[in-house]
Structure formats: structure tokens, C-alpha cells
Image (tube, rainbow, N blue to C red):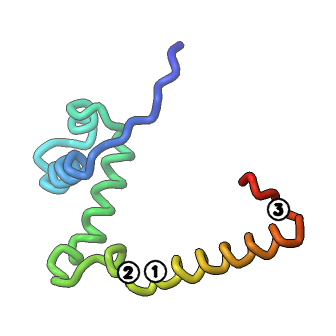
């Protein structure tokens, strides 16, 4: 018996299958057979589509894209400065080799 690897479906396929399931022109079993996807997976995608459909018409960017890049760059700079300071101090104490 061959081991089947997990497949990753594109968002376009997920949307297409979920919309087809919501349209109700075919049963879940027919859609599952057509797209070679388990019926439970189609049900999950259909539920996700109905829960997140309002976000399409929200007009604002999604919550994932609302990242303050300026603050992140500042944090990266601060951490880099701290790492450089600690590396220098540890090297002077002989606890860190200079060959790193």
C-alpha cells in the first residue's frame, strides 16, 4: 500500500469548489469525486467561505496585512545593536571565540 503525501490546494481551487458546493447544483459526493477531494474538506471550505465572505466587502485591508513595518524595522535594529554589544562583551571576556 503506497503512502499518499498531503496535497496543498491553491486558494483559487478552494474558492471554486466552495462556491460550487454553495450553489447546490451538485451534491458533495459528486463534487468530491469530480475534484478528488474528501467531502469533509469541501464542507470545511464551504463553512470558511461563508464565515469570511463579509471580509471581501469590508473595504479595509485584511488583519494579516495590517503590520507596522516601521516598528518592526526599529525592533530589528534594536535587536541587532544588542546582539553586537553582547558579542563584543563576550569576546572581550574570552567566553566567545573570535572565529564565529
Quadrant holding the C terminus: bottom right
Q: Nearer the viewer, residue 81 or 25?
A: 81
Q: Is residue 3 above or below residue 17?
A: above
Place residue 28 in its image quadrant: top left
Tell me what residue is drawn at x 36 percent, y 41 percent.
8
Q: Nearer the viewer, residue 62 or 51?
A: 62
Tell me what residue is drawn at x 32 percent, y 61 percent.
47
Q: What residue occupies the far right of the structure in this picture? A: 94
Disc 1 residue crowd, few under 14, some 14–19, many 20+, Cα 10 Å: few
Relative side of 68 to 78, left or right: left
The residue that label 2 is drawn on is 69
Badge number at residue 96: 3
The answer to whether marks 2 and 1 mark residues whose Cβ atoms lie closer than 8 Å is: yes
Tell me the element at label 3. Answer: loop
CA gap between label 2 and label 3 equals: 33 Å
Badge number at residue 72: 1
Q: Nearer the viewer, residue 17 or 31?
A: 17
Relative side of 66 to 82, left or right: left
Amino acid at each position: 500500500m503506497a503512502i499518499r503525501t498531503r496535497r496543498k490546494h491553491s486558494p483559487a481551487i478552494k474558492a471554486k469548489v466552495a462556491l460550487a458546493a454553495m450553489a447546490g447544483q451538485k451534491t458533495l459526493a459528486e463534487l468530491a469525486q469530480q475534484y478528488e477531494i474528501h467531502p469533509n474538506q469541501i464542507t470545511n471550505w464551504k463553512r470558511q467561505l461563508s464565515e469570511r465572505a463579509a471580509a471581501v466587502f469590508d473595504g479595509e485591508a485584511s488583519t494579516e496585512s495590517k503590520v507596522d513595518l516601521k516598528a518592526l524595522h526599529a525592533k530589528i535594529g534594536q535587536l541587532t545593536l544588542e546582539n553586537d554589544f553582547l558579542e563584543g562583551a563576550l569576546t572581550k571576556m574570552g567566553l566567545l571565540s573570535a572565529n564565529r
